[in-house]
Amino acid sequence: MKVLVAVAEVADVEDEFEIDGLAIDEQYLNYDLNEWDDYAVEAGVQLQEAGDDVEVVSVTIGPERADETIRMALAKGVDRAVRVWDENLEATEYLDSETKADVLAAVVEDEQPDLVLAGVQSDDTAFGATGVSLAEEVGFEWAAVVNDLEYEPGSDIASVHRELEGGVEEFTDVELPAVLTIQTGINEPRYASLRGIRQAQSKEIAPKTLDELGLESDVTDSAVSLTELYEPETESDATLFEGSPDEEADQLAELLRDEGVEA
Amino acid sequence: MSDILAVAEHRRGDLRDVSFELVTAGRDLADAAGGDLHVAVIGGDVDGFAEELNREGVDTIHTISEGEEFNHDVYTQIVEALFDELAPELLLLPNTVNGLDYAPAVANSLSLPLVTDAIDVEYGDELAVTREMYGSKVETVVEVDADRVALTIRPGEWPPAEATGDAEISQFDVSIDESAVRSTVTGFQEVGGGDVDITDADVLVSVGRGIEEEENIALVEALADTLGATLSSSRPIVDNGWLPKNRQVGQSGKVVTPDVYIAIGISGAVQHVAGMKGADTIVAINTDASAPIYDLADYGVVDDLFDVVPALIEAFGGEPPAL
Ligand SMILES: Cc1cc2nc3c(=O)[nH]c(=O)nc-3n(C[C@H](O)[C@H](O)[C@H](O)COP(=O)(O)OP(=O)(O)OC[C@H]3O[C@@H](n4cnc5c(N)ncnc54)[C@H](O)[C@@H]3O)c2cc1C
């Protein structure tokens, strides 16, 4: 069977940054594998280890720079990867979840996976919608915010826990083919071993354009556009203690005593 | 007509707070658009729910009795059918775990552009939605250029509608295509019991990813011991297995209301804040002065926790552990 893991390279913003038009100035961004996707990769690799004939393929939408991040997934045991990019995507200012779902759907058509794993959300835009949109687009069943997965490779049903609010979990049986969006904490993502990192160098990252996936260029047309991006006005009216750490700690200790905290 | 259709959320017999927040947001938008506010409630005790949802500003409540609990395959079919029937301009859903389990599917199936996790919405020539990016470090406005739109709103951002209304209550019948129901909810479980109940504590020392390594947890443990406080944490600490699940504060953890909450190396992500914003006094220790936790904090130390926490332990006569 085949498991497709959708991964994204996301940007993390430094504490101090500047905004350049509708984006954060590139020098303040550090790129990394999306936190939620790290858990999705681990879930995929664990399935591959549990079954005799399980292939795990990663797919990402992103520029060449993203190869570095994809290599991390390959180093952790993903068999091969597909990276979708072209000048049309490059020129798209705001990739909404509909566009991402359309692009990923074309890859699903190509690869015919039995199971697709994606992160619950991406760290940067936090739309939280790509996985479920994709499922609907390709007619797969789905489950969002999965924090436990019981699945025997080859079976028609995956038993999952969905993490609801307030410490309540829902148990759900999902028919395959399906898309599951994976929540952090579902497993313990492994570190890439040196051997894995070496092996990853020879694994395939197949670049694909929209055209090669049989998509028209208008797939990136979107009704949603970004019109403003700004630092929110600080609502902070916190009293900040100042001085050396010792002086700050003393002031804080005094406050805490006033609040009735006793050693 | 520029109507709004909002879909309420309930779980295990109770409407969730966000349902009433949807009414407020929906009414505002319906006023701006010059249309009616329709509210739908699906499954469970729909008549009882309809009574509760009958708040000022709601024009029509549609009840659909179908199952007890949320099932996305059922919800998807019903919301789509109702959308076809009413042809509203805006479909308004909660940005909850269940909301995110069906909103994208409905939007995709109805070919509606979708914007999630709205914290503010303005309805002018186009719908302008405010949302956050990069862990609340920036706010963005996105505009939607379409006749019909799907939108999910963040819980806690709109005041709940309270006054009683005089909505028309109407039963809506849908025949469910059972062959399209390919997921089955088999049960629920409360998680995170155990030895300590952080919701009982008067003082919480709460640790986040800023602590970096499992060994360093000893430092905040020592602070909690010295202060006679209880140790809690943000999610990554629990995800890493450094503390048990019953210590997690937040949307998917516990909601706590201590007298004093000391957030150490915690950024203040919305899902964390959902669990601790009710604390009387909030203290933050964080190197990043622009971290969202400072929007909430009453007191703050913008400095390295590895310098401040040992000094604080000493200020209370304790001995910081050697790390
Ligand atoms: C569906 C869903 C449910 C969720 N439920 C929860 C939940 O219940 N609870 C929860 O907490 N999260 C929850 N999350 C995760 C949440 O989005 C955040 O990822 C998480 O809260 C971040 O934890 P943090 O603040 O510890 O880490 P980060 O956001 O990484 O923040 C670490 C902070 O430490 C500071 N720091 C770093 N080094 C130092 C130092 N030496 N001294 C002082 N400060 C330092 C940094 O400036 C930063 O602000 C949920 C997410 C989703 C999608």
Image (spheres, coloured by chain):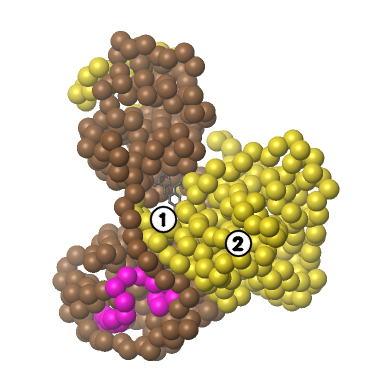
Residue at horizontal 39%, vertical 81%?
A: B78
Q: Earlier in the sequence, mark 1 or mark 2?
A: 2
Q: Which residues are magenta?
A: B59-75
Chain letter of mark 1 equals A
Q: Which chain is brown?
A: B
> Mark 1 or mark 2, which is nearer to you?
2
Q: Is residue A169 magenta?
A: no
Q: What x and y, as percent, mark residue B226?
A: 30, 18
Chain letter of mark 2 equals A
Amino acid type, label 2: Pro
Residue at horizontal 18%, vertical 74%?
A: B48
User: On the rendered image, what quadrant is the C terminus of chain A found in?
Assistant: top left
Q: Which chain is yellow?
A: A
Residue sitting nearer the eye, B285 or A186: A186
Residue assigned mark 2: A153
Question: How many discs mark residues in the rendered view?
Answer: 2
Residue assigned mark 1: A163
Compared with A100, B262 (above or below) is above
**Label 2 crowd bin: few (<14), some (14–19), many (20+), radius 10 Å:** many
Q: What x and y, as percent, mark residue B127?
A: 47, 70
Q: Secondary structure at mark 2?
A: loop
Compared with B274, A175 (above or below) is below
B175 sits to left or right of A5: left
